Image (spheres, rainbow, N blue to C red):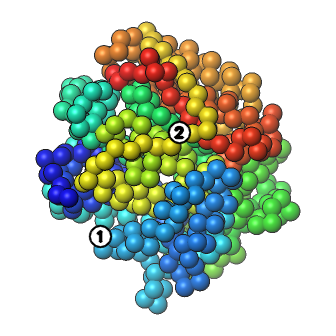
C-alpha cells in the first residue's frame, strides 16, 4: 500500500512518544507537525532517571518481562498489550541505539540496572541517571535534522468533531491568545501525564493532564483514571523543589530508614525496599503519619562512593546543592505523584474511540500497566506504541479500543467560566494530594469531587464554542481521577481505599469514563 504524503498528522506533545511518532511517521513518508506547550525538549521524559526496561540480557526473555509486568499490575494488566510491550521492546531499543541514544555500557555491552519488582537486571540507562534527557536529546536532534515542523509554546485547545480525516484541532499560543482552527487531520495526543496536578509531584510543572480533559470533551472514552502511581522517594526539604531520587538507587542497595533510624520495610514485604512501588509509597506515608516527621531517609552509604557518583551523577549533583553527600549522609525523601497509569483508552495501535484521534505514551491507556506500572516500562511504552501509531498513520484503518468492564457516564456540564486563575490550580493540587492521594476514602473523594464540580462551574466555558483554558482542563482532569477513584470500591495496585482495604474479585475489571452521548461536544 502506498502512503499518502499529504496526510499531515498533528502530534501534540514532545516527550518520547511525540518525538518518536514524529520521526517514524516522517520516515514512513508522512509530514507530521509537532505542537508543544513549552520548548521542544521540555517534557516529563527529560526528567526520567532510572531508565527503560527491555529483556536484552542473556538470562532474560520477553516472557519473564511480561510475567513481571503482569504481576506488578495486580490483576488488571491487559495481557495482549503487555505482550506487545515486552516482545517489541528489544527492537525499539535497537531503534534508539540507531538514533544515537548513548546507553551506558560495561565491557562493550549495554549495562543493565535493577529496579523494584523486576526479576532480572533489565533497566537500560544513559548518562548514569540521565536516561530521559539522553533519549530526549537524541530524538530531538533527529527531529530537527529531518526538518519536521515544530511549533513551540503552542497548546491544543479543543478537538472539534466532524472532520473527514480526523478531528478539527484548535490550537493557540501558550498564553491562550491567537486561537487557530486547523483543517481536519489525524491528531496524536502525546501530552504526557498529570502529576503536577498534585501538591507533591516528581513531574515538571507542564504535566497537567490536559490531553485527557480535551479528549473527554471531544467524546473520547477514558480508562483507569483512578490509578495514579506515587513514587516512594522524592527529595524532601522545606522550601526545596521536589526532585526524583531514582528507584535504581534502591536497586543498587540503598535502604529506607525512619526518623529513628529503623529499616521499616524489612518484615513488611519479602522484597523489603524493592517491593512494588505502591507498597513502599504507602509504607513511607504511614511512617510519616505515625511519627509526625515530614520525611523518611534513603541510606545509600552502603554503595561504594565511586559507583554512587558514576551511576547517579545528576542526583549527586542535585544533593550537593543542599549540602548532602549520599556516600556519607542519608537523603530525606517523601512519596509524590509520579505517573498517570490510565488515560485516553486506545487499542494496540493507539486508536481512541474518536475516529482519527490517536493517543500514545503516558496520556494513553492501553491497559499495559494494569493497576500499577512496573518501573521503567513508561519510556518503553512511548516507543513501542509510538511505532505502532506511526505504522497505523501510514496505513490507516478503522479500529477502536475494547470497552472497559464498567463505563461510567460522567456529566461535566458547561459552567459560567472561564473565570479561573492560578489560585484555582493551587486549590486543585491540595485537593488531589489530600483527598485523592496515596490513601483514599469515600468521604474524602466525595468531598473532593463536590469541590471540583463547584470549581468546574466557575471555569468551564458556558457555550460549546468557547474554548476551555488550562485551568478548566486541570479541574476536569482532577475530577475525572476523583470520579473513577470513588467508583472503585476496593484497593488494588496504586489505588488504596482505607474504607475498602482489600482487592475484590468483582473489581477485576477496568473502569471507563465518558461524557453522556448527548453532552459529548468538542469545543
Ligand atoms: C525512577 O528512576 O525511579 C523512575 C523510573 C520509573 O518511573 O519508571
Quadrant of the drawing holding the N terminus: bottom left
Q: On the rendered structure, is 37 left or right of 430?
A: left
Query: Residue sitting at 27 percent across and 60 percent down?
Result: 24
Marks 2 and 1, how far apart at CA = 36 Å
Q: Is residue 89 visible?
A: yes
Pointer 1: residues within 10 angstroms few (<14), some, or many (20+)?
A: some
* Residue projecting furthest to the right: 267
Query: Residue sitting at 37 percent across and 35 percent down?
Result: 354
* Residue projecting furthest to the bottom: 107
Q: Is residue 19 visible?
A: no
Q: Position of residue 417 (x, y in %)?
A: 41, 13
Q: Position of residue 98 (x, y in %)?
A: 30, 74
- Quarter where residue 363 is shown: top left
Q: Position of residue 187 (x, y in %)?
A: 30, 41
Query: Residue sitting at 81 percent across and 66 percent down?
Result: 270
- Residue 99 has which mark? 1
The answer to whether the residue bearing label 1 lies less than 8 angstroms from the nearest atom of ligand 1 is: no
Q: Marks 1 and 2: in contact by CB < 8 Å?
A: no
Is residue 76 placed above or below 101 in the rendered structure? above
Is residue 125 placed above or below 372 in the rendered structure? below
Q: Secondary structure at mark 1?
A: loop
Is residue 403 placed above or below 95 in the rendered structure? above
Residue identifier under label 2:
403
Q: Secondary structure at mark 2?
A: loop
Query: Residue sitting at 64 percent across and 65 percent down?
Result: 68
Pointer 2: residues within 10 angstroms few (<14), some, or many (20+)?
A: some
Q: On the rendered structure, is 44 left or right of 27?
A: right
- Quarter where residue 359 is shown: top left
Q: Position of residue 139 (x, y in %)?
A: 30, 62
Given this view, does label 2 or label 1 mark the residue nearer the observer? 2
Amino acid at each position: 500500500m502506498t502512503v499518502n504524503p499529504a496526510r499531515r498528522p498533528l502530534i501534540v506533545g514532545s516527550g518520547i512518544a511525540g518525538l518518536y511518532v514524529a520521526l517514524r511517521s516522517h520516515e514512513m513518508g508522512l509530514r507530521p507537525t509537532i505542537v508543544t506547550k513549552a520548548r521542544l525538549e521540555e517534557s516529563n521524559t527529560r526528567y526520567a532517571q532510572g531508565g527503560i526496561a527491555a529483556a536484552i540480557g542473556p538470562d532474560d526473555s520477553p516472557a519473564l518481562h511480561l510475567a513481571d509486568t503482569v504481576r506488578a499490575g495486580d490483576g488488571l494488566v491487559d495481557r495482549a498489550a503487555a505482550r506487545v510491550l515486552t516482545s517489541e521492546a528489544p527492537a525499539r531499543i535497537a531503534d534508539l541505539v540507531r538514533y544515537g541514544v548513548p546507553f551506558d555500557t560495561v565491557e562493550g555491552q549495554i549495562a543493565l540496572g535493577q529496579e523494584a519488582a523486576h526479576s532480572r537486571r533489565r533497566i537500560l540507562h544513559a548518562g548514569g541517571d540521565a536516561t530521559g534527557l539522553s533519549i530526549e536529546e537524541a530524538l530531538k536532534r533527529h527531529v530537527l535534522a529531518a526538518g519536521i515542523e515544530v511549533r513551540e509554546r503552542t497548546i491544543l485547545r479543543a478537538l472539534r468533531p466532524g472532520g473527514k480525516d480526523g478531528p478539527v484541532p484548535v490550537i493557540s499560543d501558550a498564553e491562550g491568545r491567537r486561537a487557530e482552527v486547523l483543517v481536519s487531520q489525524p491528531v496524536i495526543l502525546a501530552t504526557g501525564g498529570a502529576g503536577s496536578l498534585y501538591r507533591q509531584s516528581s513531574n515538571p510543572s507542564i504535566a497537567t493532564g490536559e490531553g485527557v480533559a480535551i479528549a473527554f470533551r471531544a467524546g473520547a472514552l477514558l480508562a483507569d483514571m483512578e490509578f495514579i502511581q506515587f513514587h516512594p522517594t522524592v527529595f524532601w526539604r522545606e522550601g526545596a523543589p521536589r526532585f526524583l531520587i531514582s528507584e535504581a538507587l534502591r536497586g543498587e542497595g540503598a535502604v529506607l530508614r525512619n526518623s529513628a533510624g529503623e529499616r521499616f520495610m524489612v518484615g513488611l514485604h519479602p522484597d523489603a525496599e524493592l517491593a512494588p512501588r505502591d507498597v513502599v509509597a504507602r509504607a513511607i506515608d504511614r511512617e510519616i503519619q505515625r511519627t509526625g516527621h515530614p520525611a523518611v531517609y534513603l541510606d545509600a552509604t552502603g554503595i561504594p562512593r565511586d559507583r554512587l557518583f558514576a551511576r547517579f551523577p545528576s542526583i549527586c549533583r542535585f544533593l550537593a546543592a543542599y549540602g548532602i553527600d549520599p556516600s556519607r549522609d542519608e537523603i530525606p525523601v517523601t512519596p509524590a505523584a509520579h505517573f498517570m497509569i490510565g488515560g485516553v483508552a486506545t487499542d494496540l495501535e493507539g486508536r481512541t474511540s474518536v475516529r482519527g484521534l490517536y493517543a500514545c505514551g503516558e496520556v494513553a491507556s492501553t491497559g499495559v500497566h494494569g493497576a500499577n506500572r512496573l518501573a521503567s516500562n513508561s519510556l518503553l511504552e512511548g516507543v513501542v506504541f509510538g511505532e505502532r501509531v506511526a505504522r497505523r498513520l501510514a496505513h490507516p484503518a478503522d479500529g477502536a479500543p475494547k470497552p472497559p468492564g464498567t463505563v461510567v457516564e460522567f456529566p461535566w456540564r458547561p459552567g459560567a467560566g472561564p473565570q479561573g486563575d492560578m489560585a484555582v490550580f493551587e486549590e486543585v493540587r491540595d485537593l488531589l494530594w489530600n483527598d485523592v492521594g496515596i490513601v483514599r476514602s469515600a468521604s474524602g473523594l466525595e468531598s473532593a469531587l463536590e469541590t471540583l464540580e463547584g470549581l468546574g462551574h466557575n471555569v468551564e466555558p458556558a457555550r460549546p464554542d468557547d474554548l476551555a483554558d488550562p485551568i478548566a482542563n486541570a479541574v476536569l482532569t482532577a475530577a475525572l481521577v476523583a470520579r473513577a477513584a470513588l467508583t472503585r470500591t476496593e484497593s488494588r495496585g496504586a489505588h488504596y481505599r482505607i474504607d475498602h482495604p482489600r482487592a475484590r474479585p468483582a473489581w477485576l475489571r477496568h473502569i471507563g469514563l465518558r461524557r453522556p452521548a448527548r453532552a459529548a461536544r468538542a469545543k
